[in-house]
Image: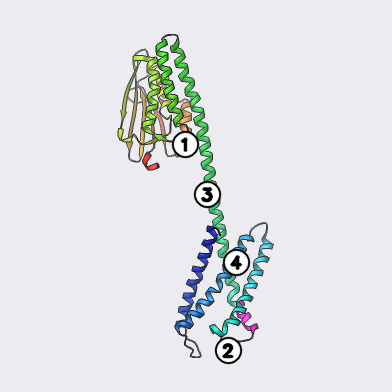
Amino acid sequence: MSRHAWLVVLAVIVWWTLEGLVTTGQLLTMQFGDDEVLTLVQAVRRGMASAWLWIPFSLGLFWLVERYPIERGGLVRSLCALTAAVLAIVLLRAVCVYYLNPWLGWYRTLPPFRDVLVTSVFNNFLLAWLNIGVAHAWLFGRRALQRQRQAEQLQARLTETRLEALSAQLNPHFLFNALNSIAEMVHRDAAAADRMLVGLGELLRSSLDHRQRALVPLREELRLLRHYIDIEKVRLGERLQLQWDIDQRLADALVPPLLLQPLAENAIRHAIAEKIAPGLLRIGVGGDGPWLLLEVGDDGDGRSSAPRHGTGLANIRSRLECLFGTGYSLELEAPPEGGTRARLRIPLQRARMAA
C-alpha cells in the first residue's frame, strides 16, 4: 500500500474515532424522555459503534472518488457511480442498525425495517455526500500539489539547461580572445608567448573544473582570474598594474564561475591596452549585510563604461538572472577619479551553508 493510501486510512480512522468520542459524550449528557439512563459502557459502545461503522464506508467512498471523480469528461458516469454508492451505504447502515440493535440498543423496541431504512436516509444520505466532498478536496489538493512540484522541476531543468548553454557560449568566447592575445605575442617574444600558453593551460584546467557547477567559492574564482591576468600581464608587461582589495573573510562566498574574468577582460581591452602609459586594474571584493559586492575598475578614459552589448556582459546578466532572478545588480559607472568601474551585487551565500 502506498504512503498516500496509508495516510488516508489513518486520517479516516482518527476522524471517526474522534466523532465516536463526541457522540459518546453527547449520549452521556442526553436526557431521554422515558427515564432511560445510559451507563458509560453502553454510551461508549453505542457511540463508537455508530462512528466506526463509517470507517469502511468512508474508505470505500475515497477509493471510488479516486476512480470516478466528478470532473469534466466523466460527469454523468461519476454521478451515477457515486449515487449508487451512497444509496448502498444508506441501505447497509440500516441493515447494521437493524441487526445490531439487540446488542447496541439504539431502539428500545425495534421498529419495522422500513422505518429504520427511512431513518437511515435522513441520517446518512447527506453525510455520505459530505464524505464524497472531503474525498474530492483531498484528491484535487493532491493533484494541485503534484502539478506545482512538476512545474518547479520543469523550471529548474529549464534554468539548468539555460545556464549550461550560457557557460558553453562563454568559454569559446574567452578562448578566442586569449588565443588572439597569444598570437600577437608569438612574433614579438616567443618566450613570453610560451609563458602565456602555460598560463592558458592552467586557466583551462580551472575552467573545466568549474564547468559542471552553477556556483563556486570565491577563492576558486579569484584563482581563475589570476591565471587570466597572468596571461595579460605577460602581454602588456609594466603597462598593466594591479590593485587587489579582497576581504579574505569572504573566500568561501559562492559566485557564478567566470564572473569576474569578462569584466577584467573588458577593462583591459577597452581601457588599459589602449593606453601608452601604465594602466591600473582594480579588483575589489567586500560584503554589505546579506549582499556580496564585487568591483572591477580601471583608470582609463571612461570609454569602457559606454553602453555596449558584448558577449561577456550579456552573458553575465543572463546567468545572474537565471540564478538570482531580480535579486542582483550590475552597473557600469564612471567614478569621479576617472576610468570605469563595474559594480556587482549578488546575494551572499557561503559554501558551508549550501552543503
- 300 and 53: which one is in front? 53
Q: Amino acid at mark 1?
A: Glu
114 drawn magenta = yes
Relative depth, front residue between 146 and 207 = 207
- Which of pointers 3 and 4 lies earlier in the amino acid sequence? 4
Q: Nearer the viewer, residue 47 or 32?
A: 47
Q: Is residue 135 visible?
A: yes
Tell me the mark number nearer the camera, choosing from 4 and 1.
Answer: 4
Quick check: marks 4 and 1 in contact, CB under 8 Å? no
Image quadrant containing the N terminus: bottom right
Crowdedness near tag 1: few (<14), some (14–19) or many (≥20) residues, C-alpha within 10 Å? some
Residue under numbered circle 4: 61
Residue occupied by mark 1: 321
Name the outermost residue toward the front. Answer: 1
Query: Residue 125 appears at what percent x and percent y?
Result: 61, 73
* Element class at badge 1: helix
Residue under label 2, please give it: 109
Residue 149 image label: 3
Q: Position of residue 130 (x, y in %)?
A: 57, 68
Residue found farthest to the bottom: 34
**Magenta span of residues:** 107-121
- Residue closest to the far top: 188
Instruction: Report crowding for label 3: few under 14, some 14 to 19, many 20 or more residues within 10 A (C-alpha).
Output: few
In the rendered structure, which amino acid carries the disc numbered 3? Arg
Q: CA distance from mark 1 to mark 3?
A: 22 Å
Do the CB atoms of the residues marked 4 and 2 lie less than 8 Å apart?
A: no
